[in-house]
Image (cartoon, rainbow, N blue to C red):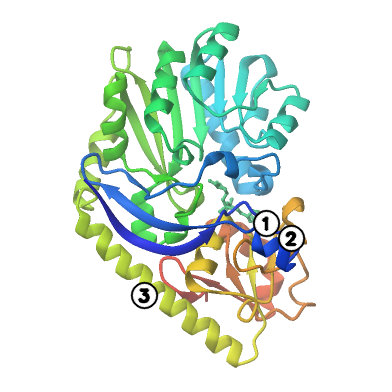
Amino acid sequence: MKKVFLNLLQQPITNSYLINTKSSTLKKEFFYNLSMIINLSNFLVSIKKPVNPKIQYTDIYAHRASQSKTMNLSFKKIAEKLKKKFRPKLTMEIGSNDGVFLKNFHKKEIVAVEPCKNLAQITNRNGYLTYDKFWDTNLARKIIKKRGKIDLIYSANTISHIPNLKEVFKAISICLNHNGVFVFEDPYIGSVLKNNSYDQFYDEHVHVFSQLAISNLLNPHKLKIIKTEILSTHGGSIRFYVAKKDSKYKISKSVKKIYDSEINLKLNKFSTYKKFSLRVQNSKKQLMKLLKKLKKANKKVISYGATYKSATIFNYCNIDKSLINYVVDTTKNKQWKYTPGKHLLIKPPIDMIKEKIDYAFLGAWNFSKEIMAKEKKFIKNGGKFITHVPKVRIIK
Ligand code: DWN
């Protein structure tokens, strides 16, 4: 049985940055209802009615995974760790974005899958064979015909974006070597509940995983979780190591430990999600109260990082340019465009002191350490950051 626990109202497609705010452009903007459900038979948290991936992952996809030092370092670290541990002859990445993980491999040792043609073009140009297709069983068969079975499959922030997980895992089991390993990481529902980070729910995050849900979903494909890690990446992620049931791998203690902690957190109970939903409603009230108070006091407030996550916040809370002047972001192809739904202008990074900014809302709260380090002068000069995680507050 599937039950709705949270309604985040009408939302735009988070990747649809607008090039202008003419009424003819606004008329074409696509909105859908973002309601979250829990499937009480396998404990998977998903969007009730996901958007069609063909309108999400286009040749104008904006996000560039290489835009933060934190992520460059994190991908380098995991690439080195996986190479050392599994010594793969052939690796594949699903959802390779602009190649931030691929670049840690030799071009002949890795193949990539990336449905956004503009991104696949970047990595193909850099010499990494990239299939600009959606991950499915047809593609899996095509790849093994050309390259043979795969020793290591890695995927970050992609598997949770795919509506049909049955097809995903079937395709994995087709092309994974007998003793191959599939490693994937995505936002963790345990962290979302702990941090009240409801902005992890948006069109692309069709599912937000728990270990409980993933082990239920892998079972029919003769796949098993051999190890699980909880990560601080992106404000709380979960990394699964998956192998064939009859492979040489034993199940590590981490799997039982995380199972126990998820039962303890009651991730298998509807009431847990309902309570979370009340906290989200309260978070909205608190954020609106704070922003309205700052506006009344004539403070200049901007948002830092035109994240997909912040689209959920702005649209759910109804935050427009009457409350936040504009957004800053380092990604060139987001700059001088407008945020989806609420149409805040996105500027390149600015001198926050010269621009007389009083407060910056952390749209990219998951990089708060990196941002604070960059903006030391702003903070020293009396500038302040606002966050909504784990609760709405001005960071002291
Ligand atoms: O899963 C997904 C995650 C990993 O990335 C995608 N579906 C889409 C995207 O979501 P997001 O936009 O919420 O991700 P980030 O990585 O939190 O985005 C950070 C944004 O902030 C980027 O646009 C870059 C920007 N930024 C900045 O302007 N200055 C980041 C840092 C660290 C900075 O100093």
Residue depth check, mark 3 versus mark 2: number of the one nearer the observer: 2
Left or right of 268 in this view: 64: right
Helix, strand or loop at label 3? It is helix
Q: Is residue 125 above or below residue 347?
A: above
Q: Amino acid at mark 2?
A: Lys
Q: Is residue 141 above or below residue 268?
A: above
Residue depicted at x 61% and y 32%: 115
Q: Amino acid at mark 3?
A: Asn
CA distance separating discs 3 and 1:
28 Å
What residue is pinned by disc 1? 17
Res 361 visible: yes
CA distance separating discs 3 and 2:
31 Å
Instruction: Give the mark count.
Output: 3
Q: Are marks 2 and 1 in contact (CB under 8 Å)?
A: yes
Left or right of 360 in this view: 172: left
What residue is pinned by disc 3? 282
Query: Dot 1: within a 10 Å radius of its alpha carbon, few (fewer than 14), some, or many (20 or more) residues?
Result: many
